[in-house]
Amino acid sequence: MQNKITQAVIAAGGQGTRLRPTTETIPKVMIPILGKPMLEWHVEQFKKHGVKEFFFTLQYLPEVITNHFGDGSKWGVKINYFVEKEPLGSAGGIKAFEKQLGDEFFFIYGDTFSLVDYTKMTENWAKKPADALGMQRMKKTQDYADADVAELDADGKFVAIHTKPHTATYPNAHRMRGVFIMRKEILQYVPENTAYDLGKKLMSDIVKRNLKFYSYECDDYSKGIDTIEKWKEVEENVRKLQSEGKA
């Protein structure tokens, strides 16, 4: 049986300017979802599925997060921090933890509320070729004007990346969602101490090199929160899922 993935990197440095005034005093990932910080939801959800060690990339009001979580012992986990002096982008932030990461790890954008079943995601990952560099949660759609998308082959392997804004339509477009499993080997393609974006730069580079990166599709609930309207929508949906015993 495939061993569980026990490490997760979470991008937690965002300001959340469209969530003001709440985010004038807390980072975006600390907005409360039914009274509990979103980042705490992440820790608890990952822990349910075997993650024991976390790596948070911080920038905006980092002390709010470090004061709340400390070393993670209150949650029975270990938490490591890296405070970016200048924004390093999603891939650049992961690179900062390269020496501490094992062969495989999860990555999630902290402003994506997620109830993904990470055990099932890991089981799917175990079926991918041994030389695959990673896997990203995807959704097939024709509604992608506001999103970066990937085209996939019949096996779910990335064959093209199309970043917004789009000037064409694509017959097999999949919206790129914010949950990943990655192999540490992928970090060799990320420059050190350099702002480097995961979707627009690293993924495009991987595809151009014809290296293997795969999609993962599931119906588990997740939602990126970048507006007050989406924040309210998530709270309403989580409240409903809790009443149904699903959250």
Image (cartoon, grey):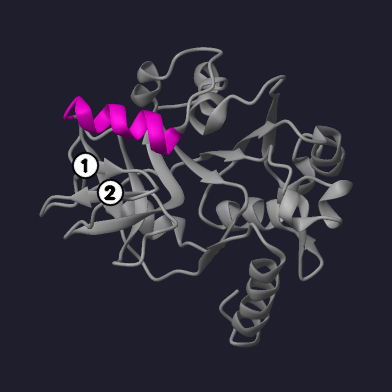
The answer for how far apart the CA atoms under marks 2 and 1 are is: 6 Å
Above or below residue 115? Residue 70 is above
* Residue extending farthest front: 167
**Circles 2 and 1: CB atoms closer than 8 Å:** yes
Which residue shows up at 72% across the image and 66% down it?
Answer: 228
Residue 222 falls left or right of residue 152: right
Give the magenta-colored segment's residue range: 198-210
* Residue that lies at the very extreme toward the top in this rendered image: 192
Amino acid type, callout 2: Ala
What residue did someone put label 2 on? 150
Residue drawn at (37%, 29%), measured in percent from left and top? 202
In terms of depth relative to the viewer, which is nearer, 18 or 113?
18
Secondary structure, mark 1, is strand
Task: Indicate left or right for 168 with 247 as reference.
Answer: left
In this view, the residue in front, 111 or 173, is 173
Instruction: Assess whether residue 72 is covered by the magenta stretch.
Output: no
Asked if residue 80 is positioned above or below residue 18 in the image, the reply reads above
- The amino acid type found where label 1 is placed reads Ala
Q: Position of residue 48 (x, y in %)?
A: 57, 57
Q: Which residue is mark 1?
A: 160
